[in-house]
Amino acid sequence: MMYKSILIWFLLLWTSGGWAQTFSPVGIEIEPFRTNDSQIEQKGRVSVALPVLVSGKDRLAVSPQYSYLSLSDAFPFGSNLFHQVDLRMGWRHQMNDRWNFIFLFDPALSSDFDPLSTDDLMWASGISFTHLMNARTSFSLGMFYAYRFSNNIIIPTVGFKWIVSDRLTFLGNIPFRIQLSYQAEPSLVTGFFFSAIQYVSGISRSPDYDYIWLHERNLGLFADRMMSKNWWFKLQIGYNLKCDLEAYQNLDEARWQFGAKLTNTGLMPAYKYSENGFFLNISLTYRFAGSKTSEAF
């Protein structure tokens, strides 16, 4: 019961608190298809979530996650397969009937792992305060910090959730994702989404580049279907409004940036590749009864 209780809380409240994070018990995601001329071949991730504490007004969970990025041989990086291992930790505290806050800490190692080095350590942390206005509406304000290879990025976040009707829900985790979902039936949710996605990884085999930075802006449709019991299958079809893969050399000193983009756009990349096109993303997630699939990003 403790496991079910804590993870339902995180599924319902973490995603409406201004973060593009999901603490599902089990999640598998893969992006196997892009347009034929894409040099970004495949992305994917596997994650689990484990409860650590549920006591009174506090909930604490950890979520190990592995993700990867596969590129074609056209890039001059010496490596075409990059890995990232995260240990996400989330703490939610209920302040009163109207207010709660969520704290995130996410250390990660990300590189081609050839060899594995502590130089490839990254982390992110942040806090978000959520106010429940009424049974159908809530909003949140937060601040997010990310360390990426001597780049220190501070991002203000705004979240909202509006249950328009029993079937229609409008969610936002700005600047990460905005979603309009329609519950066609208890086992089927469809809708539209806009997302901002980034992937950062160190490079070990190249003498010219030290890390890559993939930044995407996507617009698309999704359908989320319960297949059996608590297993949900999700299909996303969309278009890359912007997709930039850039390579950089390490900075001589730390750099700070404040803004709404999770990318180091103020630096001049040593290499840049851009593309646009359609993509297909599929995922399989286990969720307890009582968690809304449309809210689990």
Image: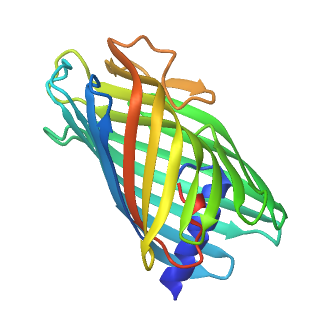
Residue 139 appears at what percent x and percent y? 77, 52
Residue for point 50% across, 59% down: 224
Question: Observer-nearest residue: 286 or 36?
Answer: 36
Question: Observer-nearest residue: 282 or 21?
Answer: 282
Residue for point 27% across, 27% down: 36
Residue 63 appears at what percent x and percent y? 42, 63
Quarter residue 253 falls in: top left
Is residue 139 in view from this perspective? yes
Residue 293 appears at what percent x and percent y? 55, 64
Residue 18 appears at what percent x and percent y? 65, 49
Residue for point 47% across, 37% down: 238
- 209 w.r.t. 40: above or below: above
Question: Observer-nearest residue: 37 or 287?
Answer: 37
Quarter residue 92 falls in: bottom right
Left or right: 212 as drawn, with respect to 289: left
Residue for point 41% across, 65% down: 285
